[in-house]
Amino acid sequence: MKDTTQLARRVRIQALHMVHRAKASHIASALSICDIVAVLYGQVLHVDPTQPEAPGRDRFILSKGHACVAVYAALADCGFLTADELLTYGQDGSVLMNHISHKATGVEFSTGSLGHGLPFGVGKALAAKRMRAEWKTFVLLSDGEMGEGSNWEAMMFAAHHKLDNLVGIIDYNKLQSLTTVDQTLRIEPLADKFTAFGWAVREVDGHDHTSLAAALSAAPWTADKPSMVIAHTTKGKGVSYMENTVEWHYRTPNAQQLAQALTELQG
């Protein structure tokens, strides 16, 4: 068990360094999920860096693959990746690609094009059921990707097959690439839709570690139903000038902006 608050802080700092160094983007999307990722790796997931492919491990899939630096940073902090490997992020020939890659130790599935993670996770959960295995599958999705029909097909399939070993998490920061989710394609009433599709649903503050750990550790909450956590988050969380600002979906922090962000996070 790790101190997840400190883990999230370290992940945010490392993610900023990685994006700045690689002149990459999607930093605000990554900052949005750092608390969720920290709670997963620090308290919830049954994974072991000394046996990254252990048959009984829990499976974690990042469906919003553009936020990969948060997961890469957490994997390094937990011993799956080295500090030297993080330095190669976004470089030619590196396994740490700008959208999450299964070539990196500890990563289950490559994603980037949205709407792929949950269908894959459903397949994993179904496989576990048929093997009578105890491991769970966790899938972290963006709110913007709920406009992808593949997710709704996967949700119907999961409920039909009673995959209560499957946990979905929505990073609900209400912003996507160019504007708000509501302006792009309204997804509300989201909880009602998930419920109608046969899932057990809980809504939490996606930056409250106690609430996240309680919800994620207790799943499944209802027998024979997959679980969906709607995590209300802030895009760019932790860096004042990035919070709730759509421009930071694609912008890269320069040296001065990086220094300001690090000062805020390091307190």
Image (tube, rainbow, N blue to C red):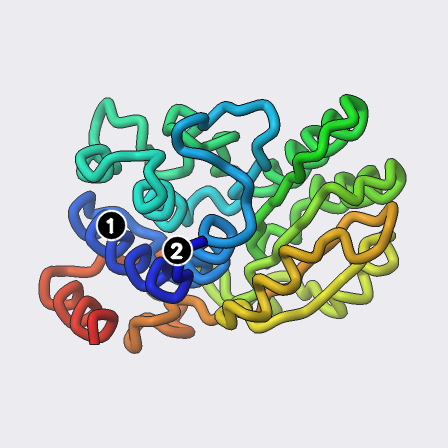
Q: How far across and down, in percent of the image, does residue 128 sit? A: 73, 28
Query: Residue at coordinates 59% horizontally, 23% vertically from top-left?
Result: 55
What amino acid is found at the position of numbered circle 2 in the picture? Ala
Q: How far across and down, in percent of the image, does residue 246 sit? A: 40, 67
Query: Residue at coordinates 28% horizontally, 53% vertically from top-left?
Result: 15
Answer with left or right where residue 17 lies relative to residue 36.
left
Q: How far across and down, in percent of the image, does residue 64 sit? A: 51, 47
The alpha-carbon separation of the residues under discs 2 and 1 comes to: 10 Å
Q: Residues within 10 Å of mark 1 (few under 14, many from 20)?
A: many
Disc assigned to residue 19: 1
Q: Nearer the viewer, residue 241 or 147?
A: 241
Q: Do the residues labelled 2 and 1 touch (CB within 8 Å)?
A: yes
Q: Relative to 19, does residue 185 appear above or below in the rendering?
A: below
Q: Residue furthest left?
A: 255
Answer with left or right where residue 219 lies relative to residue 30.
right
Tell me the quadrant of the picture where the C terminus can be found: bottom left
Q: In which quarter of the image is residue 185?
A: bottom right
What amino acid is found at the position of numbered circle 1 in the picture? Val
Q: Which of 144 and 78 is in front in this view?
A: 78
Q: In which quarter of the image is residue 205?
A: bottom right
Residue 236 in view in this figure: yes
What SS does tag 1 mark? helix
Q: How crowded is mark 2: few (under 14 residues within 10 Å), some or many (20 or more)?
A: many
- Identify residue for label 2: 30
